[in-house]
Amino acid sequence: MEVVQYAEHFSKISETFIYDYVTELEEQGCYPSVVTHNHHNSQERPFDRVRVVDWPGRWHPARLFHRIRLRNSKKPYVASFWPQVRSRLSPVVADIDPDVIHAQFGPMGVVMSPVARSLDIPLVVHFHGYDVSFLLPDAFWEEQYDALFDSASGLIGVSNHICEKLRQLGAPEEKIRLLHGGIRLAKFDYDPPTPRFDGKTVQCLHVGRLVEKKAPLDLIRAFSEAHQRAGDDVDLHLTIAGDGPMREDVEDLIAELGLSNHVQCLGNVSHERVVELMQESHLYTQHCKTASNGDQEGQGITFVEASATGLPIVTTRHNGIPDVVNDEETGLLVREGDVEAMGKKIAYLALHPEEWSSFSEAGRRRVKEKFDLTKQTRKLISIYEDVA
């Protein structure tokens, strides 16, 4: 089966899941091609069948024409270049002649939908998070999604929460599929933290961009609470791996709370280093919440990686996270924004290392059952077969 994966960006560091699915599809006998507007990290993540379709320039005459024509629309700058993009996409997709087109994220599904319809190729659209949170409610996107739900052959959500959002938006039940993001288990050795606990130092870890929906400031406040509760019984530390627009605010709060000797900000690190950090830590801690603009985390693939490694997790009941973290079995969950509760949970686990093993074993088992890339890709292929 030949499949086109359509994504605005291919192989960004923050979107490893697309590259992983493409390469695993190939290993399982599919013949995937990628159509994208931006190809990243081609040396580090090689894949030959990539077609790059350039966006039209801002001042291109045709784009200016459409922008003027749409000047009374609420979203003229969003929609103004779509006719040109579609005219460029159509011959590329026709040349590949796939059995199925798989669009990553709702907006790319909207862009690709008329092309797929004109070529009579089934379209599957994959929703990951911001496309059903940050973009909505908005009359423009609701109208676009209404049309997309009618024309697409399949609609994938990465979490139960996102699938429910699609239902609320009016997507037909028979088109909705749940497909969790998977990881290559072989890259994550099971390395539970109990054997490396020295009886004193407890190392917490956060991996992710320093943006509002990942709430690094709430995590630091929760860690401060945990540090006070743990007292002298354990030497509690937190490592933050990631960068972003909140970096300065994060460092200022660390200094303000007197945590400079206990919290370390590494900035961006490689994925290989992330794996090493997980193998050096005892607990995984992250406080995701809905941002002020409505943006939400999707499933959160880092939680899957942490569980695969064997780290007990303390985090929030947010979007797809409860799909990964089973409360009181693989980790502990608190309400979004409840800094005090999170601090208590971190302190509790830090003070009770005898409970880590059960969390570690359950977490690895859950990843094997529900988030193994090989199994998830088989499900994806079955979706392709259904719509084709």
Image (cartoon, rainbow, N blue to C red):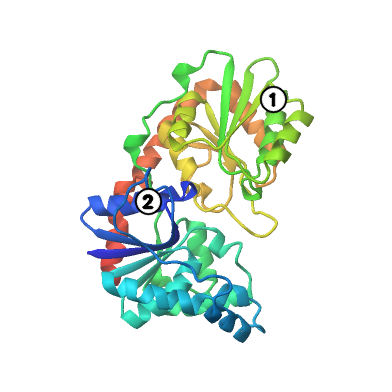
Placement of 139 over or under 12, stated as above or below: below
Q: Nearer the viewer, residue 238 or 266?
A: 266
Which SS class for mark 2? helix
Residue 130 is situated, as x and y percent measured from the top left of the image, at 56, 59
Residue 235 is situated, as x and y percent measured from the top left of the image, at 63, 17
**Marks 2, 1: nearer the viewer:** 2
Which amino acid lies under the numbered mark 1 shown in the image of this protein? His
Task: Categorize mark 2 by other alpha carbons within 10 Å: few (<14), some (14-19), many (20+).
Answer: some
Earlier residue among tags 2 and 1: 2
Instruction: Please give the residue where the numbered disc 1 appears in the rendered image.
Output: 227
Q: Nearer the viewer, residue 33 or 286?
A: 33
Answer with the quarter of the image where residue 383 lies: bottom left
Q: Which mark is residue 19?
A: 2
Quadrant the N terminus occupies: bottom left
Answer with the quarter of the image where residue 210 lies: top right
Q: Residue lying farthest top?
A: 199
Which SS class for mark 1? helix
Residue, x 50% and y 76% (percent of image)?
Answer: 82
Distance from disc 2 to disc 1, alpha carbons, whole Å, reads 39 Å
Q: Are marks 2 and 1 in contact (CB under 8 Å)?
A: no
Count of numbered marks: 2
